[in-house]
Image (cartoon, coloured by chain):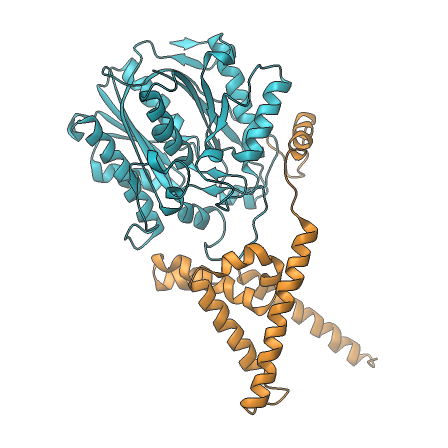
Amino acid sequence: MASNKNNKLNLEQQKYQSFAQKREPRRPLLSNCLKAFISGGAICVFGQLLHFMYIKYFSFTENNAGDPTAATLIIISVLLTGFGVYDTIAQWAGAGSAVPITGFANTISSAAIEHRSEGYVLGVGGNMFKIAGPVIVYGVFSAFVVSIIKMLVNYMGGI
Amino acid sequence: MVKGHQSFIFESKPVILASATSAGPFEAQGPLAEDIDLIHDDIYLGQDSFEKAEKLMLEGAAVKTMEKAGINKYDVGLFISGDLMNQIISSSFTARTIGIPYLGIFGACSSSMEGLSIAAAYVDGQKVKYVLTGASSHNSSAEKQFRYPNEYGAQKPPTAQWTVTGAGACLLSTQGNGPKVTGATIGRIVDMGISDPFNMGAAMAPAAVDTIEAHFRDMEIEPDYYDIIVTGDLGSIGHKITLDKLIENGMRISEKTYKDCGMMIYDSKKQQVFAGGSGCACSAITVYGHFLNRMRRGEIKKMLAVATGALHSPLSYQQKESIPCIAHAVAIEM
């Protein structure tokens, strides 16, 4: 009965799944997109305000104001995660709170908090990048591939 | 005595002498709060991990049950328990503390009724004088093991369910006063190819349908024999699928007699639990607490409790396996 590797379902399973699907509420895609747009946009606008603030009051330049901005957003995200608020916001915001740098900070800090009970080395250290790890692995790898392509293009005369 | 293909009649009618439940703060806000014996206002229960908190909750329910029955733990012949944790640590560590001969079982969320049916079989067949059975789950430890870290901001779909934090236990005896366990139907694994762990209701509903139909076929009775038929943790979606499927298959069953624990334990209007409650404690608290209390007050005479379980693991899910499901039914009569 169990589905095989190709996820082929037998007739009875197919019939049941369409029977069940009619009774399942769908993910509210449109409103989720809208909420993600609003909340993700709000985080970015807030980041931009921070950016201006660092330039205006802390004598950063256009080029290096990004660093303290990112750091501030990360600290706020980690604090909200620690106080147990971030997951509540995320249930409403969805991708809006997951995609910006705040979401990345949340994955790492939530895993660190969760596995504190297994100790600092195997617990916190071993699990901190449980969710963020794949992002880093494939992020670094794709950056590597893209830079090789760029290098080849340059080598062959460039554009 | 075997009846039909997969059902059993307990001729000596083992008596549920006492039952007790414990739960966390979120369950205390739900409509069944007054049927919960031990309410904790801290999900950690003063411990340093969720796993230890869950163990303490099961321990509390087990000890409270024996206290209510007025039975010393040295007189209890057997402790049968299950939970959701890897290697069922909550149950085994509770057994370590209370020191009663122990059988650990795993039936995921169906552990409560699996335990009750095994306990009844030991009392009925082997004449063990007192058998204690229990089940527990903890929202945070289950999330940690099966899904993501608790504080991780992942958006849950409307088909998701909320694992109940709590535990329930009951003590069976060869004689005494109280609700009696008259029969049980042991379920078969049913797998309809659903592999989404955020859609447990739809995955488990066919198992509930299979077991409920088997029960009435084996026992040669009609659904109106029972005042109430209750499933463990299908939630609102699974409940609807089960009811529609049973009616489609020609069973005369009404929405008035068929309930689901997952829809009763929380107030879905005020509490954000998506499709409803789930976990071993969902059926344990609702059946051992709410329904047994109503039976003792004489409001219900005959009940069929069907606990459903999804027998997957995080590993099997990642390897793209579908979710095998099971349901066990226990008939309790006053």
Q: Colour of chain A?
A: orange
Asked whether B93 or B26 is in front, the reply is: B26
| Relative vertical location of residue B46 with respect to residue B265 in this rendering, above or below | below
Instruction: Provide the letter of the chain coloured cyan.
Output: B
- Residue pictured at 58% horizontal, 61% vertical: A98
Residue A54 screen position, x and y as percent: 56, 85
Task: State the residue lying farthest toward the top.
Answer: B220
Q: Is residue B277 left or right of residue B11?
A: right
**Number of marks drawn:** 0
Q: Quadrant of residue B39?
A: top left
- Residue pictured at 51% horizontal, 42% vertical: B269
Q: From the image, which quarter does the N terminus of chain B lie in? A: top left
Residue B216 screen position, x and y as percent: 50, 13
Residue A156 screen position, x and y as percent: 82, 79
Residue A94 screen position, x and y as percent: 60, 57
Q: Is residue B91 left or right of residue B310?
A: left
Residue B35 visible (yes or no): yes
Q: Is residue B115 left or right of residue A12?
A: left
Q: From the image, which quarter does the C terminus of chain B lie in? A: top left
Q: Quadrant of residue A3?
A: top right
Q: Is residue B141 left or right of residue B63?
A: right
- Residue pictured at 21% horizontal, 24% vertical: B77
| Relative vertical location of residue B218 with respect to residue B112 in this rendering, above or below | above
| Relative vertical location of residue B164 with respect to residue A54 in this rendering, above or below | above
Asked whether B334 or B65 is in front, the reply is: B334
Task: State the residue lying farthest toward the bottom.
Answer: A59
Asked whether B238 or A124 is in front, the reply is: B238
Residue B190 visible (yes or no): no
Asked whether B49 or B263 is in front, the reply is: B263
| Relative vertical location of residue A80 with respect to residue A29 in this rendering, above or below | below
